[in-house]
Image (cartoon, rainbow, N blue to C red):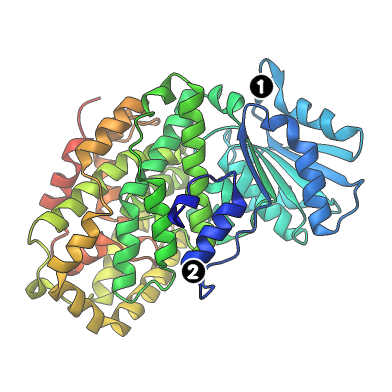
Amino acid sequence: MTATGTLTDPTDLEAIRRGLAALDPEGRLAPLGIGRIEISDTAHLHVAEALDEALAAAGRPSRATVVILADTTPIRRDGELLAGLVERQLAGHHAVQLARLDGGHGALHADETVLAMAAEAARGADAIVTIGSGTMTDVGKIAAERNGGIPHVAVQTAASVDGFTDNVSVILRNGVKRTVPSRWPSAVLADVTTIAGAPQEMNTAGFGEAISLFTAPADWYLSFLLGLDHTFHPASLAMLQAAAAEPPDWSAGIARGEPRAVRELTRLLALRGIVSGVSNTTACLSGVEHVISHMLDLHHAAHHQPIGLHGAQVGVASLVATRLWREAIDTRVITPALLREPEPARIEGLIRQAFGQLGDGIVAECLRDAEAKHAAVIRNWARFEQVVADWPRHAEAFAKLVTPSATLRKALAASGGPASFQRLSPAISPELTVWATRNCFLMRNRFNLVDLLDMMGLWTEERIAWALAETLEAA
């Protein structure tokens, strides 16, 4: 079996470790810190076993004080509350406390209020068990880290994001979504029956997140070529390509809650999380499509409006990203004569114009990131000139990383997920869609294709309208 052949089963962590080691003889990748991933119909019955393994590995007492963290949403499995099923498994051997987190927003947000609440609930505990979707798991990772890196068993209840199996957390800071270091969960238990019974929009959102696998690595590779991202590694790319080697012909089963489709989706998302964790970055799976989604979240949070499902937004925005990338790959739009160094004063003006109505804190956060990005661009300007001059050769590599939008649209529609911004929940108006897309390169210190298009004078109203044409169809 080849090294890449060992990289597609996230439940066989030792095989993945061996495969990555074969592709990374210099040891640049981060160690894979998860002890167990289970994707099965009976995963929910193995919480006690997984917790005992994690306690032993951490040198913690076998009879432990355990805090179960969950939000206020009642999650049921075959009619029974999942929290109760988990609590009963642990109560005979451990001192167990269930803490329900409520940040006062309806849906749980990983803001500082909730993070502090979770860390306080876990104070003095030997271990944490979280029950819920991606946000709950992210909160648990940070609560575990703030309490000395205690063991954390995550019971996954939806296949909505890929953040269950990585070592970072997505949080809200000053109203802006940021990815921050946290820690690997000790174990992830994905119960297929519970996930299949989750609201359909959760799992279709997960598929939306998953298809960014077919666009985002191009932005990561571009940033590497330009000298701006030093996390790029061929082993990570090999794992991503192995994960995407088979077309998702199972996507139609997601809408119907078919076990095979749910299992395949959960597997794919788990692999994505592992890649970003060992790569020490989410940039490998977070490009143009993700910043468009983050822009929508930013707007809604600043206006105290409901925030949509991240993966659903990413799925639609992936259709925009692949349209832009395929133009850059298949045409001569990227040419050396157009390349110009960015002007800090102009970028500052764009940021103030785009985000001024959202508050001074958001403006300041974006300005800090823009300053750091500009400094990195100037340090690497010779690389920019070389890459653009040699764009036709690089386009051949990019072509292997970006799937045409028609293919992604077909798979997304088959999954039952929205394929236009108006079909998202909450629905996104054309005006807000244009705002989020136009300004997406201004919100964070990462470089993607839109940054390059702007530096070449190509990020025009006409090109934005063209890029959005397929995703602004009437609902």
Residue 8, can we see it?
yes
Amino acid type of disc 2?
Asp
Q: What residue sits 71% from the left and 45% below the top?
A: 153
Q: Which mark is residue 127?
A: none
Nearer the observer, 394 or 234: 234
Q: What amino acid is labelled 1 in the image?
A: Arg
Residue situated furthest front in the rendering: 1
Horizontal relation, residue 452 to residue 56: left or right = left
Q: Secondary structure at mark 1?
A: strand
Q: Is residue 316 above or below residue 204?
A: below
Across and down, in percent, residue 471 comes to: 23, 36
Q: Where does the image place residue 341, in percent across and percent down from the top left?
A: 20, 78
Q: Residue at x 59, y 39 (%)?
A: 108
* The quadrant where residue 232 appears: bottom left
Mark 2 neighbour class, 10 Å CA radius: few under 14, some 14 to 19, many 20 or more: some
| Tag in front: 1 or 2 | 2
Q: Is residue 17 left or right of residue 226?
A: right
> Which residue is under mark 1?
76
Residue 352 sits above or below residue 108 on the image: below
> Are discs 1 and 2 less than 8 Å apart at CB?
no
For label 1, the crowd category at 10 Å Cα-Cα, with few meaning under 14, some 14 to 19 and many 20 or more, is: some
- Give the residue number, with chain letter if any, for mark 2: 24
Q: Secondary structure at mark 2?
A: loop
The quadrant where residue 77 appears? top right
Q: Quadrant of the C terminus?
A: top left
Q: How many marks?
A: 2
The CA distance from mark 1 to mark 2 is: 42 Å
